Each structure stands twice: as C-alpha cells, then as structure tokens.
Image (cartoon, grey):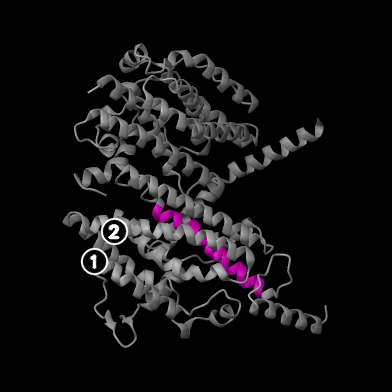
Amino acid sequence: MSEEQIMSLEKYFEERIARDEKIEPKDWMPEKYRQTHIRQMSQHAHSEVVGMLPEGNWITRAPSLRRKVALLAKVQDEAGHGLYLYSATETLGVSREELYEQLHTGKAKYSSIFNYPTLTWADIGAIGWLVDGAAIINQVPLCNTSYGPYARAMIRVCKEESFHQRQGYEIMIKLANGTPEQKEMAQDALNRWWWPSLMMLGPTDDKSVHTEQSMKWKLKRKTNDELRQQFIDQTVPQADLIGLKIPDPDLKWNEERGSYDFGGIDWDEFWQVVKGHGPMNKERMKARVGAWERGAWVRDAAMAYAEKKEKRKQAV
Amino acid sequence: MKEHLYNYILGIADNSLILGQRMGELCGHGPSLETDIACTNISLDLFGQVRSYFQYAAKLAGDGRTEDDIAMLRKEREYVNVLLAEQPNTNFAYTIGRQFLFDIYHLLYLTELQKSKDLTLSAIAKKCIKEVSYHVRFSSDWVKRLGDGTEESKQKMQEAVDDLWVYTDELFHQTEADKVMITEEVGVDVTKLKEEYYTRVSEILEEAGLNIPESKWFQKGGKQGIHTEHLGYLLADLQYMQRTYPNMEW
C-alpha cells in the first residue's frame, strides 16, 4: 500500500470514530490503534484475573454462608470478565497464550491495587466499595469506546461491577453498624485502601502519557484527575453516611468548586508498586505463574484427548 | 425437635458443605480460566444447597440457632460428612477424582430423595438435581480427558482414583438417622444405590482407559464424626471468623 493510500485510510478511520461509529475486528485500523487496544484490553483482562487472588483469599474464611456464596459469585464474575476481555482482545489478532506470557514475564501490567494484601474480612468490603467503585468510574465511559468488541464487553462488565460495588458497601454498612470491633475493622480497611484506590485512577494529567491519543479514540472520555475528583466526590458522602472517616486530614468541601479538596497522594508509593515492588507483586505473580505451570499437564491432556477424539471420529 | 430428621439433614448437608469448601480453595488457582470458573461454580452450587438444608435444620431445631451456627460452630467430631468429601486438592486429578466419585453418588441419592415424604427435602432435591447433573457431566468428562489424555495425565488420574477408592464404600453405610428416616419414607436407603453406583463409575473409568481398583479394604468413620486429619485444618478456615468474633452479624 502506498503512503498516500494509508493516509487516506487513516483519515477515513478517524472520521468514522468522530461520527461515533464502532470499529469492528475485520475493519482496517492503524497499527497503533491495534497495539494500544491490545495493551489496554489485556491489561484489563489481567486485572480481572489477578484480582481474583486477593478476594479468593477470603472465600474459605467468609464469616457466614450468605457472604461466602456472594463472594464466590463475585470472584466467578471476575473470572468471567477476564474470559470475555481476553476473547475481545483475541479479535485483534493476538492469542490468549501470548497474553498470558506477557503477564507471566512481567511485560504486561495489571491494576496495581491488587498488589495490596487482604488482611481482614473488612478488606473484602473495602475492595467492593472502593476498588470496584473506582473501577466503575474508569470503565463506564468505555461502554461507548470506539472498538466494538471492547465496548460490548464493557456493558456487561459494568453491570456486574456496580452490583459488586453495592455488595461491598453493604458489607461495610454491616460492619460500621456492628460491634466496636467490627467498626474498627471497617475503619482500618478504609484507612489502608483509600489512598491506593485514589491511585487507581492513574497518574496526574501532567504525568499521564497516554491521555491525548486515548481521548481521540474514545478509550478515555475524561482525564485521570477529573475521574479521581468524581470518585472522591461520590465516595466521601458514602463514608459519612456510615460513620467512617476518610483518612485524609486535608479533605474539605470546597463550596466554590462544588467538590472536595483533598491531600497529596504519595506518588512514590504508586510508582514503587507499578514497578513491581509493592507488598504483594511477587506473591501475585508467583500464584499466577504457579497455577499456570501446575496446570500444564492438565491442558496438555485436554488437548491430546481432543485430538484423539477427532481422529477416532474421522476413522469411523 | 425431630432429632432424627435433624441429624439426617446434617448427614446430607455436611457432604456439600465440606466438598464446597474444598472446591472454594481452588478459586483463582485452577489450570485454566474455564476450569476455574467451573470449579467455583460447583462450589457455589454446593453452598447454595447447604443453605437450603441448614435453613430447614435451623427451623427444626427451633432454639435460635441459625444456618451459620450449624455450619460453623460445631466441633470436629460433630461433622458427619463422608471422608471422601474432605480429601485435599493434592492435584487437579485428585480434585476431579473426588468430585467424580461423589457426583455419581450424589445424583443417584438426590434422584431417590425427590420421592421423600418430607416435602421440603423433596423440593430441595428437585432443585439440586439440575445442578448435580451438570457436576456429573463436568467431572466425568474430565476423568475421560485425563484418563485418555497423555501418559502423564493417565498416571495421575489412576493414582487419584486408586487413592480415593477406599473412601467410596462409606457412601453406602446406613446411620441410625438413616434407618429411622427410611421407615418413615423420608430418607433414602443408600445400600440400594451401591450396585448402580459402581456400575456407573466403572463405565466411565473404562471409557477413560483407567483400571477399576480391586481393593477390598475401605475406610469409614466420617458418618460417625471420626475423620481424617485433613478435616481439622479445613474447619479452622471455615470457622475462623465465627470463632474469633463470636455472636456478631456479618
């Protein structure tokens, strides 16, 4: 293809996106669009799958049968999200094995929040309330993103995530209205998860390298700082309502802006975790790689069996 | 309180409780995302069943005990699940082997329980049977895949079946509660399921190219609360919150 032809294809492509048309797997797309989507979508899929670990950590110890069933269902939903996000990513011409390889070798990232440990039952509530809450804020705009398979996957993901968020908040309500021990457990979880949750919305706008291009392709509709503000404004009243205190001495309602002012985020901690040195980075990867390696003989067996079955069918 | 009926329900529900707990341990650690989802789903089904049984048992007890008290606040010797259910997830072949050897029994059992004169039990059985039919399909398919897959998988699956086989006979032992409930046409006579069970199990094992263990030595005791050493650890996890934070709502 000549350079001129490519230029005109690109122009047509950008016009389609500007008209809010969906780009489908068989449509022509610039290589950078493909790569950016592979990166973001697989990162999202990896986050779902790695995210199963901190919550799965409490399945065997859930405090009641009702909570256990709800947590199992939630973690199962996350596995399901992982599955269809991987499938959606595969439509861009990359295999699931390649994507796993990228995760296991540390080439691909996943949401840093899952590198924090779940120490008490209240952490399960805090994850649902804060982490899923921040995830929804990040993800709702993606239901209208330009790449069709991603947008469609996100519609389903977001429905389930908002259910998880309510479920998490409900755990917190119960704790906050419970015994002093339970309330203390809830406050402690909020103290530990608050700042990492704010970091989930990404680096500040001046440090975010992908924002401009992502805005153009509708992979992003608002900047990181706007999303963070939205999250804070939405979450502070929820904490107030159940009598928990946001662990930020600088948090204050700003009448003029109609928003909360908040204290500085420890970006050194953020980059430390992103670069692989958070409290649980190594354990999370060990768990994923371990499961994958321990399961190799099982996957080989399934493959061998399928081939034998196919051969027998042909022989008949 | 209808003590025999209460004990009879524990006998059914504890199997689902302990097996569900074992399957729940695997969440996030399975050999593939698809098997992870399936194992979590089986765990979810089993705990759903447990809730139906224990809610009924709590009603019968009528002394303020809840489903969670019954599930999480008994002592080790008071759990009456079969030994098979508590065996650990040594590897995926053991997980599948345990599930398969239980599922075949479970389906036969529920098919009979549907005819119970106790309408609650019969209704629970009818609901569970749909789920358990899926469990049978899942675990049987995997026994075939692993048995007839590679040399390595065949050897692992055979080892698991051989090791778990000693726990199968206990499934067909009658308890005191069983005997009373059978005369009242509420309970299932498990001794009558034995022949069909071994026929079905053998069919699948043969199809998978696996040997049917010939051992005539079996283990028992679970139904009397005499367990393997594995159960204590499982209960430590299961009961952790209820024991550490007594009398609280979650």
* Disc 1 crowd, CA 10 A, few/some/many (<14, 14-19, 20+): many
Question: Which tag, 2 or 1, sits closer to the chain's start?
Answer: 2
Instruction: Name the spot of residue A114 as percent of width and height, x first.
Output: 42, 62
Q: Nearer the viewer, residue A66 or A106?
A: A66
Residue type indicated by callout 2? Met
Quarter of the image where the C terminus of chain A is located: top right
Q: Residue at x 47, y 44 (%)?
A: B40
Q: Which residue is mark 2?
A: A172
Quadrant position of residue B154: top right
Q: Does A278 appear above or below B16?
A: below
Residue type indicated by callout 1? Leu
Residue A211 shows in this picture: yes
Instruction: Name the spot of residue B208 as percent of width and height, x first.
Output: 63, 28
Instruction: Name the spot of residue A139 as percent of width and height, x first.
Output: 49, 68
Q: Nearer the viewer, residue B78 or A115?
A: B78
Does the magenta stretch mainly form a helix, a strand or a loop?
Answer: helix
Q: Secondary structure at mark 2?
A: helix
User: Residue placed farthest to the left in the image?
Assistant: A180
> Which subunit holds the residue at mark 2?
A
Magenta stretch bounds: A33-55
> Which subunit holds the residue at mark 1?
A
Quarter of the image where the N terminus of chain A is located: bottom right
